[in-house]
Amino acid sequence: MLLSSEIQLMPDMTFFIQLGIFLVVAVSLNYLVFKPVLKIIQLRKSKTEGDRKKIHTVAEKTEQLMKEYEAKMEAAKKEAFKLKESLKREGEEQGQKVIHEAKQASLTQIEQIKKEIAISSDHALKDLEEQSKTLGKNLAEKVLGRPIN
């Protein structure tokens, strides 16, 4: 055929054999190679998209949980601060109460001591008056040289 000088427009029998072999190979490759590979690619794609959606969902949940955690921590800090201030105020009030009670006790003690001093002073004055009278009488008797009634 190659050596022949005439050109044939009609295909010969080898064309149909080649066409048959091509169709058999194409169909075989389609079922044995292309469809399984395309199926695997599709599965990977759907799994990747599903994983991306899961990752996005988990990221949103994580962000939401972090916001809730931060809000709870802020609320706990505020509550702790309030409790601290309350305990501080309560301590100051108790301190003031103790100081007030101590002042009252000391004032009461001072008043009692003042009364005791006044009583002791009155007794001392009376004793001094009696002693001065006795001393004056003794002195007068010694000066006069006679007893005085």
Image: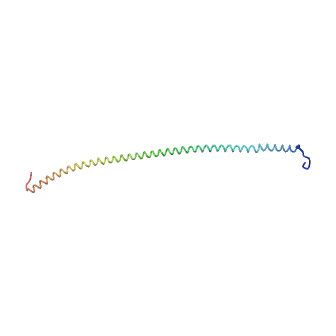
In the drawing, does residue 114 fall left or right of residue 27? left
Taking the image as shown, residue 94 lies to the left or right of residue 71, namely left
Which of the 4 image quarters holds residue 8? top right
Residue placed most toward the observer, 28 or 81: 81
**Colour setting:** rainbow
Residue 129 in percent (x, y) is at 16, 51
Left or right for 148, reference 97: left
Q: Position of residue 124 (x, y in %)?
A: 19, 51
Taking the image as shown, residue 42 lies to the left or right of residue 91, namely right
Number of residue marks: 0
**Residue 42 placement: quadrant:** top right
x, y percentage for residue 69? 53, 45
Residue 16, percent from left and from top:
86, 43
